[in-house]
Image (cartoon, grey):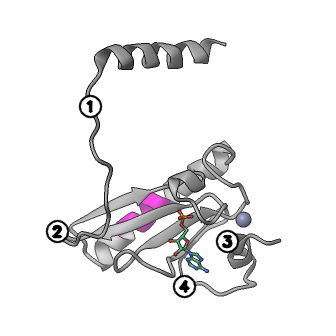
Amino acid sequence: MDCIFCKIVAGAIPAHTVYEDEQTLAFLDINPATRGHTLVIPKQHAPDLFSVPPEALTATALAAQKVARLLQQVVRPDGLNIVQNNGSAAGQVVMHYHVHLIPRWTGDGALRMWRPGQTDHAAFAALAEELRRAQEA
Ligand code: AMP
Ligand code: ZN
């Protein structure tokens, strides 16, 4: 078992747990973007969004809402981002599906978001059509 989050689930390495239920675990990120930055994971190992089973995905989403409300109550942020990386190209470092909950305060500059691209309705129409067609196959 060389997955660091599986080791946390197994209790083999320590974590600052903030929430736990049968299927999920939430603990503080070791290098927080802001105070209260928390990771929510399914206990069952799956590398990413593409592979996580529906039940584990649902349980993680429900746990994320619970922990978001907990953070709202306790650390009282002005807002909160959910970040979820899949693949190293997208910035994923730990290959065990996880959701980042990042409390935000006005003007904190904690996250760099994407640069908005150009609107191209012709290209969008073609891509949306391709994506709809792919569901029929
Ligand atoms: P990602 O880039 O989405 O894969 O994020 C992985 C996150 O896991 C990073 O924000 C790390 O700071 C965090 N992390 C790595 N190891 C640990 C650990 N042992 N305990 C808590 N957080 C961790
Ligand atoms: Zn794992």
Tell me, yes or no, whether the two marked residues, 1 and 4, touch with CB atoms within 8 Å.
no
Residue where numbered disc 1 is placed: 118
Q: Amino acid at mark 1?
A: Gln
Question: How far apart, in angstroms, are the residues tagged by discs 2 and 4?
Answer: 26 Å
In the rendered image, residue 23 lying in the magenta stretch gets the answer no
Q: Amino acid at mark 3?
A: Phe
Kindly identify the residue that appears in the image at 63 percent across and 66 percent down: 94
- Whether ligand 1 has any atom under 8 Å from the Cβ at mark 2 is answered as no
Residue 110, image x, y percentages: 30, 70
Residue at the right extreme of this rendering: 1
Residue at the bottom extreme of this rendering: 14
Residue where numbered disc 4 is placed: 16
Question: How far apart, in angstroms, are the residues tagged by discs 2 and 3?
Answer: 31 Å
Residue where numbered disc 3 is placed: 5
Relative horizontal placement of residue 117, taking residue 44 as reference (left or right): left
Depth check, mark 4 against mark 3: the one in front is 3
Helix, strand or loop for disc 4: loop
Tell me, yes or no, whether the two marked residues, 2 and 4, touch with CB atoms within 8 Å.
no
Tell me, yes or no, whether the two marked residues, 2 and 3, touch with CB atoms within 8 Å.
no
> Residue 106: which numbered mark, if any?
2
Numbered-mark total? 4
Depth check, mark 2 against mark 1: the one in front is 1
Give the quadrant of residue 121: top left
Residue 63, image x, y percentages: 51, 61
Question: How far apart, in angstroms, are the residues tagged by discs 1 and 4?
Answer: 42 Å
Helix, strand or loop for disc 3: helix
Tell me: residue 24, above or below residue 19: above
Question: How far apart, in angstroms, are the residues tagged by discs 3 and 1?
Answer: 38 Å
Kindly identify the residue that appears in the image at 60 percent across and 49 percent down: 57
User: In the rendered view of the protein, which quadrant contains the N terminus?
Assistant: bottom right
- Whether ligand 1 has any atom under 8 Å from the Cβ at mark 4 is answered as yes
